Structures are given as structure tokens and as C-alpha cells.
Amino acid sequence: MKIIKTINEIREQVSSAKSSGMRVGFVPTMGALHAGHLSLIQAAQKACDFVVVSIFVNPTQFGAGEDLDKYPRNLELDAAKCEALGVDVIFAPQVSEMYPDGFDSWVEVGGEITKVLCGRSRPGHFRGVTTVCAKLFNIVLPDAAFFGQKDAQQLAVIRKMVRDLNMPLSIEACPIVREESGLAMSSRNDYLSDIQRVDAAIIYKSLLASEELFLSGERRSSVLRSKIASMISSVDYAKIDYIEIVDPDTLMPVEIVENKALVAVAIEFGPARLIDNIILSLNNA
Ligand code: AMP
């Protein structure tokens, strides 16, 4: 497995894989790889012949005062995990390779989709995400890119960017991988103390409770949201950023859930801002 740092070299590698007829799969990450990331890599390997994993802590998606500096970085350990899975290439550029002096072009998805949910509390975040993903897609030129449903808004925004700008790749969504407690795996879980990690299981429990209410016939978003809020409030230091019930594609609020909706939450849990979600669907019943 190669670890490549330059755009020229990753282009050469992918181009030679493509010229031998391989389908190229791409898994963009910020590293500190956990089982959630590894599940994306495995999905990519299942669907493609040549898999590129990028590891890049993208500064443009962090706001002032966010955790850019303390975000966990461990390329050696990440590389060992990728190698064990049989990843073909890691692309791990320096910031200066992706954003050289004079860089001043941005890709921004307009409309409400980037303004609601995390867009409200993290202004500019999705502009950073779409810009880096557009750049990575242009650099790697994959046939398919694999994203986690964990970041449901990111997935919806990337899908819209690809559709609106006719980017020639498919976007594949992979299910959320959870710890045994139900806590969604996240590199940011590293910020939690042992006790906070145990307490944080309440997030998924509350989502499951809302699903149970929904499946027993409750359709009012306000009631479903209150159930989640009251469970999360049982942890006295947990601060609710948002609990929203929205259309899974447009992310517009849904007052009465008919067939399908996305329940998305963001909770300041001590030192970590944790996000999680669940899809309510009558087809899951
Ligand atoms: P990140 O390194 O946090 O930027 O995440 C890279 C990719 O991994 C994104 O597509 C995430 O949605 C995905 N991902 C992160 N956590 C999980 C998880 N627990 N289950 C599935 N995918 C995940």
C-alpha cells in the first residue's frame, strides 16, 4: 500500500489503475480511523477494484474556536489499519498541497440545505466540506465515493453538489456503525472521559425511543422531539444544539411524519459535539 502526499502522484496511480480497466472507489476521511471508516472502505472494496482512502484534516471546514488544532491525527496507525484491510492507496496531502498560497475558489451549495441543522451552528462548515470534496473528486476522479449516513446532512449536501454540478461519480451511503453501547462511532468520541462515553449512550437510546413512539402510531414531530429532549436532559451536562425531524433529502422540517423522516440531533456532550440520527420509516416496522 502506498501513502501518497502529492496530487501529481495520486493522479498517476489512479490513471494507471483506470487504464487497466479498474473501477476506482474513494473514501474521504479526516483520519483517526475507527470501525465506521473501515466499513466504508469495505463497502468500497466490495463495489470497486481499486480503493483510495484520503486522510486530510480539512482546515476550511472548521470554524473559529472549533477543534482543528486538537483533532486527533495518527497517520501511522491509520495506515496500518488501511494496510490490514488491503487498501490500495492512501492520499494524505499536506494543507499546502490542497490550499497553496493564492487559493481562492470555493464550491458552495446554496439554499436551505446548508443553512439548517449543523449549518446553523457551524456557519461556513459545509462550504469547506463541499470545496474539499469537489477538489478531492477532481484529483482522484473516482467512479464512486463512499460516505457514512452518520453525517446525514453532509451526505445530502454532497449528493446535491454532485447532482447540481453534474460531477461524474456515484455517491454511495453506508450505515452508521455504533459502539456496543449504541453510541455512534466518531473520532470525536476520543474527547470523552470514560463516564461521558457511558452517558453518551443516551443519544442513541433517545433516538430509538422516538422510533418506538413513531412505530406505535405517534406522527407528531413535536411529541417525538420532546421524548428525545427529555431523555437527553437526564444527563445534566448535555447541551442540546438541535433535535430536528426533517425530510431526508431536502432536510426541510416535517411537522407530521407520514412515511419517512430523518431524526437528526447534535448534542454538546462535555468536550465533544456529537451528532447522530435515525431514519423513521414505516417500512422498518
Ligand atoms: P470523518 O473522518 O469524520 O470526516 O468521516 C469520514 C467518513 O466516515 C464520512 O463519510 C463519515 O460519515 C463516515 N463515518 C464517520 N463515522 C461513521 C460511523 N460511525 N459509521 C459510518 N460512517 C461513519
Image: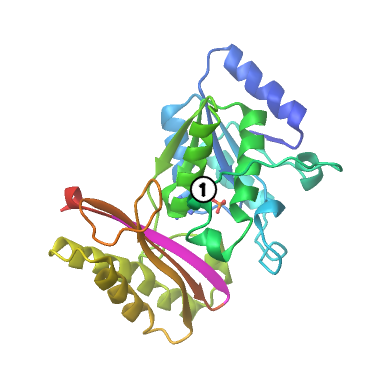
**Total count of labels:** 1
**Rendered residue at 18%/47% (across/down):** 283
Quadrant of residue 188 in the image?
bottom right
Q: Quadrant of residue 20?
A: top right
View extreme (top): residue:
20
Query: Residue at coordinates 54% horizontally, 79% vertically from top-left?
Result: 270
- Residue at the (66%, 66%) spot, across then down: 67
Residue furthest out toward the left: 216
Q: Residue at x 56, y 44 (%)?
A: 109
Q: Is residue 108 left or right of residue 104?
A: left
Residue 44 lies, in percent from the top left, at: 46, 34
Q: Residues within 10 Å of mark 1 (few under 14, many from 20)?
A: few
Q: Which residues are magenta?
A: 271-279
Prevailing SS of the magenta stretch:
strand
The residue labelled by disc 1 is: 111
Q: Is residue 136 visible?
A: yes
Q: Give the residue at the far right of this rendering.
A: 101
Residue 184 lies in the magenta-colored region: no
Tell me the quadrant of the picture where the N terminus can be found: top right
Question: Image height check: is 57 above or below 264?
Answer: above
SS at mark 1 in the image: loop
Q: Residue furthest front?
A: 111
